[in-house]
Image (cartoon, helix red, strand yellow):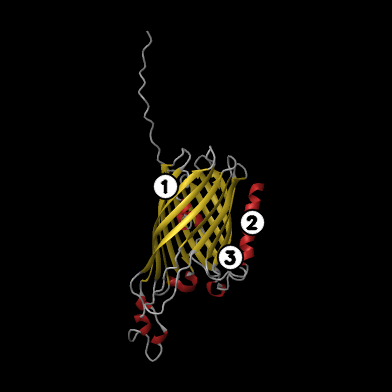
Amino acid sequence: MKILRLPLLALLGLIVATNLGQIHAQDIHFTLHRMTPLAFNPATSGGFYGSYRISGLYRDQYRSVAGNAGYKTPTFSVDAPVLRGFKKTDWLGVGIFFYSDRSGTGNLTQSSFKISAAYHLALNKKGTSTLAIGYQTGSVQREIKDPFELIFEDQYLGQLPGSELPQTMEQLEMDKKGFLDHVGGLKFTSKYNKTDEFYIGISAGRFGKPDWSLVAQGGQYQVDPRAYGEIGMTTVLNSKWRFSPNITYQKIMGNPANTLVIQGIMDLNYNPEKEIVLRGGLGYRSGADIGDAIQIMLGADIQDIRVMLGYDVNISSLTSASGTFGAFELAAQYIGKIYKRPNPDPIIFCPRF
């Protein structure tokens, strides 16, 4: 445990020192971020014990404030370790990832489909320490699904709402606006004894500041690069309990937007014979003033299936409108195992004479 204190404290101290008082905006984020592993770091592709992994997550945010115009974000991913590497303890993992984020009266939709690959390099003979090098690429698109549901200022200046096509509407790009995203990532994982594991990872993407404006004339909205960092561990406390603390940090380069999340999850080995593990934890997500949300996480592992529920208790200045009802998440993950049946040579039993 002592070997983990220095990196954990160093990362937390660096984040606080460089970003105190600069927390304003946000990018796409999830409370159950570990249930959608390819969303932020491609180095996680194929980084698990099993033959393939299927992950799905749905987030519903600020329905208490905006009703059906709130944020609705489903994600889906599949990844697998597919090839042995240059050494017996190395392997190559690949994956696909999809998400769609829809919000507002006009159903402003951002969606993406990406493919990823990661090479997991063993750093010792036993393979207990690995360095994963990942790359992800794919399209990111944005469009307004229902543009005629929008009402602009010029509709109220000298004319009734909806009386004729407003000038602002004519300036909108009705086609999708998109760009090709490239994401690179690293992840170091070390199993320093039979039960405990430590990991740290970084990733960055959205380079080149692509044009993201849906206005045909005068639009100058560009997408800034995004950096992401994660550090955490899993430690077995006794035969019944396991503890998993985790810190993630997300930074939009070139502006003060950033997000800090601190979480802790406890696992209870409820029924070892039926392989049932109960999970629960709390988290904190940064924001202006005292923060954005307190996170509540509940779930269970039933053999190879993991299900999780996440809920954000809003603590920001929006509580006067939201009544502390922030976001709700539902996630499921399945790790399949495919093993080849042994095909031994036939044994001929000779009778004894």
Residue 20: x %, y % from top left? 63, 67
Residue 108: x %, y % from top left? 40, 71
- Which amino acid, mark 1? Ala
Dot 3: within a 10 Å radius of its alpha carbon, few (fewer than 14), some, or many (20 or more) residues?
many
User: Residue 10 shows which numbered tag?
Assistant: 2
Give the secondary structure at mark 1: strand
Residue 312: x %, y % from top left? 54, 64
Position of residue 200 in the picture relative to residue 142 (left or right): right
Residue 1 visible in the displayed image: no
Position of residue 98 in the picture relative to residue 243 (left or right): left
Q: Outermost residue, bottom direction? A: 158
43 to 215, vertically: above or below: above
Residue drawn at 47 percent across, 69 percent down: 63
Give the secondary structure at mark 3: loop
Dot 1: within a 10 Å radius of its alpha carbon, few (fewer than 14), some, or many (20 or more) residues?
many
- Which amino acid, mark 3? Ser
Q: Give the labeled residue for mark 1.
A: 80
Q: Give the labeled residue for mark 3.
A: 286
**Cα separation between marks 3 and 1:** 33 Å
Residue 340 visible in the displayed image: yes
Using the image as rendered, state which of residue 246 and residue 58 is in the foreground. Answer: 246
